[in-house]
């Protein structure tokens, strides 16, 4: 019997965490991000923005999308999915971050 | 647009859209005259004072004591924030909030200098447990 398996390439959304080295909210979110990566098999790009100008410029380039959803400013931590343009900013409970990640597909 | 103003009596410099009606130092009325940024810079240069990390804490505590907010009693959090504030001053010129990113527009970024005008932020305004975005200042418990 010939069994044919069709594999559909899984599309994985890019998940970015803009964070700052000396931001307490970012520090508080790191364990949530670690846990999500383990439990949901996702990967965040963790981009530090106060000590890395390239990362800072990348975050600035998304300002028209990010700022309106973050009090009009570029705040850390900010979770951002370029594919969906969805944004979550600030220190949030694990479940809220998880829901946001799952929504990105 | 903000401009520089100098009190012709005592030499105080004011940076703002309009000058103070009464000079807060010498109390003379209508004493401010508009000056250039170069003149303001030269006038202030000789008395320029650095503020160390040890001096910053009492400065912001004094600033907070007559207000409805206080410096966060979470010492570890405050130390982390001080690390960021002073790293930003060293690397980027001013005590920018370590939990927001500057835009590179100088006037816009002045809003990020600590202490910022956090009373209008949604993390503070109308909230019983309000705090500034980074958490350095929290609403004082009554």
Image (cartoon, coloured by chain):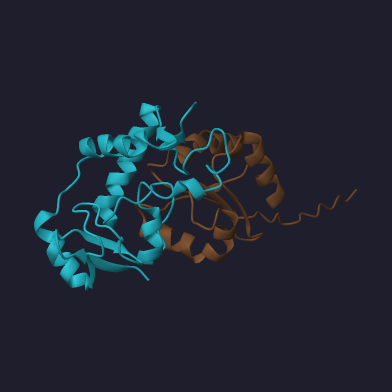
Q: In which quadrant of the rendered view does residue B17 lie?
A: bottom left
Q: Is residue A52 or residue B44 the one in the foreground?
A: B44
Report the residue at 39% width, 54% height from top: B112
In the displayed orientation, state which residue is furthest to the left: B46
Placement of the N terminus of chain B among the 4 image quadrants: bottom left
Chain B pictured colour: cyan
Let me know if residue A62 appears in the view.
no
**Letter of the chain shown brown in the rendering:** A
Outermost residue, right side: A1
- Image coordinates of residue A51 in percent, x first then y, are 34, 52
In-image side of A82 versus A19 (left or right)? right
* Residue B71 left/right relative to B13: right
In the image, B96 versus B122, the foreground residue is: B122
Horizontal relation, residue B53 to residue B64: left or right: left
Q: Is residue B112 above or below residue B129?
A: below
Q: Against B78, is A71 above or below?
A: below
Residue B75 x/y as whole percent: 36, 27
The foreground one among B41 and A20 is: B41
Tally of marks: 0
Task: Find residue B100 and report its horizontal and vertical position in percent.
Answer: 44, 51
Can you name the residue that lies furthest to the front here? B29
Residue A87 placed where, x, y %? 61, 53
Asked if residue A16 can be seen in this view, the reply is: yes
Q: What residue is rendered at 30% in x and 36% in y?
A: B62
Q: Above or below — where is B140 with respect to B7?
A: above
Q: Quadrant of residue A38?
A: top right
Q: Image quarter for residue A54?
A: bottom left
The residue at the point 40 percent across, 56 percent down is B111
Q: Is residue B87 left or right of residue B44?
A: right
Residue at point 57%, 38% (across, down): B127
């Amino acid at each position: 019997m010939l069994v044919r398996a069709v594999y559909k390439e899984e599309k994985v959304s890019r998940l970015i965490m803009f964070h700052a080295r000396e931001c307490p909210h970012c520090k508080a979110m790191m364990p949530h991000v670690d846990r999500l990566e383990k439990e949901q098999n996702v990967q965040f790009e963790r981009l530090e923005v106060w000590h890395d100008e390239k990362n800072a410029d990348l975050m600035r380039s998304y300002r028209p999308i990010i700022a309106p959803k973050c009090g009009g400013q570029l705040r850390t931590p900010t979770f951002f999915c370029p594919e969906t343009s969805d944004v979550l900013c600030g220190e949030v409970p694990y479940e809220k971050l998880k829901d946001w990640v799952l929504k990105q597909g | 647009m903000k401009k520089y103003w100098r009190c012709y009596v005592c030499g105080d410099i004011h940076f703002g859209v309009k000058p103070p009606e009464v000079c807060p130092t010498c109390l003379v009325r209508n004493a401010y005259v508009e000056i250039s940024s170069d003149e303001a810079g030269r006038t202030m240069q000789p008395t320029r004072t650095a503020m160390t990390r040890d001096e910053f804490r009492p400065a912001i505590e004094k600033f907070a004591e007559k207000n409805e907010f206080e410096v966060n009693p979470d010492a570890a959090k405050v130390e982390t924030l001080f690390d960021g504030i002073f790293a930003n001053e060293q690397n980027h010129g001013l005590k920018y909030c370590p939990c927001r990113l500057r835009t590179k527009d100088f006037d816009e970024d002045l809003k990020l200098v600590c202490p910022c005008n956090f009373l209008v932020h949604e993390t503070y305004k109308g909230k019983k447990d309000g705090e500034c975005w980074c958490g350095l200042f929290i609403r004082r418990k009554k």
